[in-house]
Amino acid sequence: MDREFQCKDCGSDEVWTTKQQKWWYEITNGDFETSAIRCRPCRKKRNQSKAEQKAHMEAMAKKKPHPNEAFFKKSFIKKE
């Protein structure tokens, strides 16, 4: 049966249809205890943000390290 929910991000009232639930539980083997919490536009925006973060981190990993990087990673706290 269809389940109503409120989007966690934008607060809009949405419906998680039986077709969507069937796909989630049977095709993706989603956990039976879960339920939808975000509307499609908010999910799309969140996934886009994650993809941008991942691309940024991959670009940073390929970037040549700063010549003084070791200095900045050095701990200045005296150990007793």
Image (cartoon, rainbow, N blue to C red):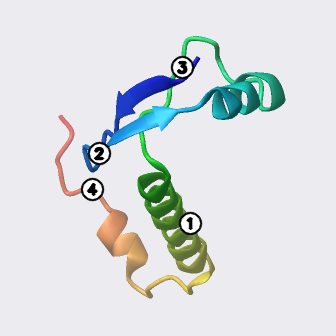
Classify mark 1: helix, strand or loop: helix
Q: Which residue is mark 3?
A: 34
Residue drawn at (58%, 31%) of the image = 17
Q: Residues within 10 Å of mark 4 (few under 14, many from 20)?
A: few
In space, the residues marked 3 and 2 are separated at their CA atoms by 19 Å
Q: Along the line of sight, which residue is nearer the eye, 44 or 52?
A: 44
Classify mark 4: helix, strand or loop: loop
In space, the residues marked 3 and 4 are separated at their CA atoms by 44 Å
In space, the residues marked 3 and 1 are separated at their CA atoms by 24 Å
Relative placement, left or right, of 43 versus 76 is: right
Residue drawn at (38%, 83%) of the image = 68
Q: Which residue is mark 4?
A: 75
Labels 1 and 4: the sequence-earlier one: 1
Q: Which residue is mark 2?
A: 12
Instruction: Residue 2: give x, y in percent of width and height.
Output: 54, 23
Q: Any mark on residue 51, and which?
A: 1
Tell me whether the residue at label 1 lies in contact with that at label 2, contact meaning CB atoms closer than 8 angstroms: no
Give the label, 1 or 4, closer to the camera: 1
Q: Quadrant of the N terminus?
A: top right
**Location of residue 28 with respect to 46 vertically, above or below:** above
Labels 3 and 1: the sequence-earlier one: 3
Residue located farthest toward the right when viewing the structure as drawn: 27
Classify mark 3: helix, strand or loop: loop
